[in-house]
Amino acid sequence: MSAVARKELHRLVDHLPDTDVMPALRFVEYLFSHHDSAQAVSREAEELGEHGEHAWAEGVADLDAGRKHTLEEVKREFDL
């Protein structure tokens, strides 16, 4: 699952408008600075196995179908 997730992350980052690159960078830096917490979340996601793969596929389908949050909504949620 990790390789699939990384590939999708790269795809999404590559398509960000220039105005959204810095907020995305700050968020990824935040995740990196909380590495232990991120590792715990990652382990939990991997433990989900098939259910996690299904949830990931649903998330991608939601994005493709336009069911997504705006950058402004995400910024508000993460106080960016």
Image: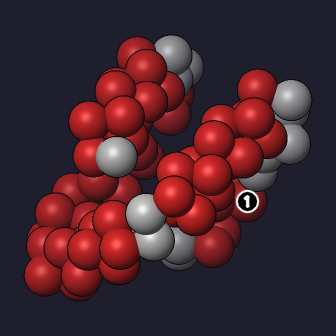
* 51 relative position to 3: left or right: right
Residue at 36% x, 57% y is 27
- Residue 75 can be seen, yes or no: no
Residue at 63% x, 73% y is 77
Q: Nearer the viewer, residue 72 or 6?
A: 6
- Residue 47 can be seen, yes or no: yes
**Residue type highlighted by circle 1:** Glu
**Vertical placement of 11 versus 73: above or below?**
above
Residue 67 image offset from top left, x and y in percent: 86, 42
How many marks the image carries: the answer is: 1
The residue to which callout 1 is attached is 73
Residue 24 image offset from top left, x and y in percent: 40, 44
**Vertical placement of 25 versus 80: above or below?**
above
**Vertical placement of 12 versus 5: above or below?**
above
Element assignment for label 1 = helix
Residue 59 image offset from top left, x and y in percent: 68, 47
Q: Nearer the viewer, residue 41 or 35?
A: 41
**Vertical placement of 65 versus 11: above or below?**
below
Residue 33 image offset from top left, x and y in percent: 14, 71
Residue at 34% x, 46% y is 1
Disc 1 crowd, CA 10 A, few/some/many (<14, 14-19, 20+): few
